[in-house]
Amino acid sequence: MALPLTVDFHAHGQSPKAMELIAGAPSNPGAEANPHNQQLARTRYGPAFRDINIRLHTMDRERIDMQAVSPAPNYAYWADEELSNQIVTASNEHVAEIVATNRDRFVGLCHVSLQFPELAAKQLATAMTSLGMRGVEIGSRVEGVDLDDPSLDPFWAAAQEHRAPIFIHPSGTTLGKRVAKYYLGNVIGNPLDTTIALTNLIFGGVLERFPMLNVVAAHGGGYLPSYFARSVHGHQVRPEMHTISRPPTEYLRRIWVDNLVFEPLFVAHLVTVMGASRVVLGTDYPFDMGQENPVDLVEAVPGLSDADRDKIKGGNAIDLLRLA
């Protein structure tokens, strides 16, 4: 197989069986119905999820050679162990079915039951070996548990052992009523949740305890690259932040982010802060809060060398997914 030139690290599939299991669960806490999202599910998202030809046509239009397909981020971390395992199995098998339609165009990222870390470790091993997955997608928190909680260490250990890139994608926010209007729960809340998750991984010592973890963050890493200097300053003056043995920037530069930031100016900022070797393409297919021009954004960044453009377009993702 020829290596792809452009790789979208942030694209989704949706398992009908998993959605049925989630919708029919008595323990489902439910979500506030959004009429516009319901309309989009009928008119845009549904066909885009179901029809592989729509997916391929969209990729061609966006100049995407390959998608890393992850399940839509409805993690159902509230589910009990049996139900959660059924949801994860359905989601992962669906992604595997998409990949099987065209292995030159698709690779898969799996889901796991992160609320049960030992089970999650086993699910990851199964997905990476039996289903041929190339990584795993997780949420930015697990109900009331943040990602730096020591209880999650069995999962981190499994991800490190299997060299599975970990794609962190938020699903909602804990900000509640403060972002209930103007769709701010997504517009502001999702990037903030990612920012908190990554900061916890750094200052909670997860990246120190598991030095071979490969973490990729959606939506440009949230707000982390934009104001990390405040965290660096806090580490210098606040004893509460003296939890890691190296300067915070060393851990920041171990994280990858996608370029889902909409404007060349902000892609340029990601490259300045993170480095060209730490940025991948992301569309958030097929959602309306995604972007349809990730390759164009990279090409519009002034001053980038051809080598750095190629890394962002596909080279970094190829390394992360071990396609070579």
Image: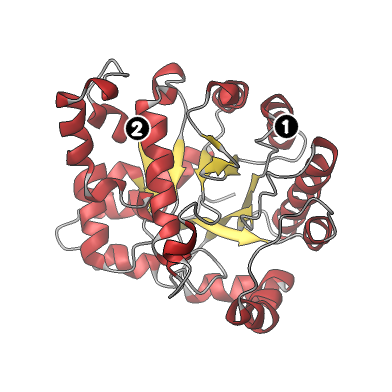
Q: Amino acid at mark 1?
A: Thr
Up/down of 64 relative to 248, above or below:
below
How did the renderer colour the structure?
secondary structure
**Label 2: which secondary element:** loop
For residue 268, side relative to residue 258 (left or right): left
- Residue at image coords 44%, 49%: 193
For residue 316, side relative to residue 96 (left or right): left
Place residue 105 in its image quadrant.
bottom right
| Residue of label 2 | 254
Viewer-closest of 6 and 125: 125
Give how far across and how far down residue 220 sits, in percent. Answer: 36, 54
| Residue of label 1 | 129
For residue 68, side relative to residue 53 (left or right): left
Q: Earlier in the sequence, mark 2 or mark 1?
A: 1
**Label 1: which secondary element:** helix
Place residue 6 in its image quadrant.
bottom left
Give how far across and how far down residue 23 sits, in percent. Answer: 80, 61
Q: Amino acid at mark 2?
A: Arg
Q: Gap between marks 2 and 1, in whole Å?
A: 25 Å
Would residue 281 be seen by someone viewing this image from the given angle?
Answer: no
Give how far across and how far down residue 293 sits, in percent. Answer: 40, 71
Viewer-closest of 15 and 178: 178
Counting every numbered tag in the picture gives 2
Residue count near mark 1 (Cα–Cα under 10 Å), binned few <14, some 14–19, many ≥20: few
Which callout, 2 or 1, points to the residue nearer the camera? 2
Up/down of 98 relative to 154, above or below:
below
